[in-house]
Image: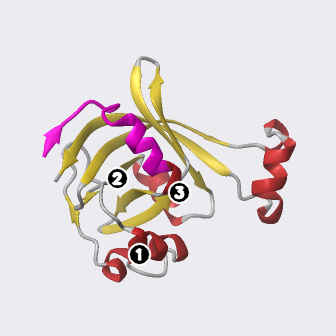
């Protein structure tokens, strides 16, 4: 495990994020993994942050609301089959780790684990959360992403990155 700054490999990680990264949550002994291709990496309030965007209907949303933490994994290996499973099923109904064969390792600074895969990992603690509102949204974005799922807007979880590292 190699400690690295949160912006290490930023171009590579953002390219991975634009396709599929993994967001892990954990509550009451249950770990859930979701795929995410929406997120932002940056600095706010002089803190390194990752902004996760998660629909209210997602199980991960429910778990983050309870724990106020999550991990993000930018895999440096092909996990397309696992991504397909994680993207098509809900952690409310199935154990995605068991279905995919993925395993976890303990987080270093938070109780949520990280995926035990080669890649870069962020351990995040929510410092601000906000639900999107239709009246503030660009009409073209509304039509493209929300007209078919009215009232299923994303929440923005602005989270301080407490730890960042690469695993082989």
Q: Is residue 60 left or right of residue 123?
A: right
Q: As rendered, which of 10 and 116 lies closer to the eye?
A: 10
Give the magenta-colored segment's residue range.
1-17
- Point out the tag, 2 or 1, that comes first from the N-terminus: 2
Q: Earlier in the sequence, mark 1 or mark 3?
A: 3
At which x and y percent is residue 160?
39, 33
Indicate whether 127 appears above or below 37: above
Which residue shows up at 41% across the image and 58% down it?
Answer: 22
Q: Is residue 67 visible?
A: yes
Disc number for residue 109:
none
Mark 2–mark 1 Cα distance, whole angstroms, equals: 16 Å
Q: Residues within 10 Å of mark 1 (few under 14, many from 20)?
A: few
Q: Quadrant of residue 24?
A: bottom left
Q: Nearer the viewer, residue 88 or 56?
A: 88
C-beta proximity under 8 Å, tags 1 and 3 = no
SS state under label 1: helix
Residue at 32 percent of width and 43 percent of height: 122
The residue to which callout 3 is attached is: 61
In reply to whether residue 84 is colored magenta, the answer given is no
Q: Is residue 91 visible?
A: no
Element type at mark 2? strand
Residue identified by numbered label 1 = 81
Disc on res. 73: 2
Kindly identify the residue that appears in the image at 81 percent across and 49 percent down: 142
Between disc 1 and disc 3, the foreground one is 1
Percent across and percent down for residue 43 are: 45, 24
The image position of residue 149, as x and y in percent, is 77, 64
- In three-dimensional space, the C-alpha distance between marks 2 and 3, rounded to whole angstroms, equals 17 Å
Q: Is residue 2 magenta?
A: yes
């Amino acid at each position: 495990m190699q400690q690295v700054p949160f912006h290490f490999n930023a171009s590579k990680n953002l390219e991975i994020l634009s396709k599929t990264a993994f967001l892990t949550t954990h509550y009451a002994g249950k770990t859930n993994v979701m795929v995410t291709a929406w997120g932002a990496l940056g600095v706010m309030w002089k803190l390194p942050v990752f902004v996760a965007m998660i629909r209210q209907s997602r199980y991960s949303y429910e778990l983050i609301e309870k724990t106020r933490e999550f991990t993000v994994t930018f895999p440096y290996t092909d996990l397309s089959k696992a991504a397909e499973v994680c993207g098509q099923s809900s952690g409310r109904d199935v154990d995605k780790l068991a279905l995919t064969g993925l395993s976890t390792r303990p987080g270093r600074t938070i109780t949520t684990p990280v995926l035990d895969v080669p890649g870069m990992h962020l351990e995040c603690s929510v410092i601000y959360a906000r639900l999107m509102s239709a009246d503030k949204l660009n009409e073209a974005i509304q039509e493209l992403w929300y007209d078919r799922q009215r009232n299923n807007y994303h929440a923005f979880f602005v989270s301080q990155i407490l730890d960042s590292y690469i695993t082989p």
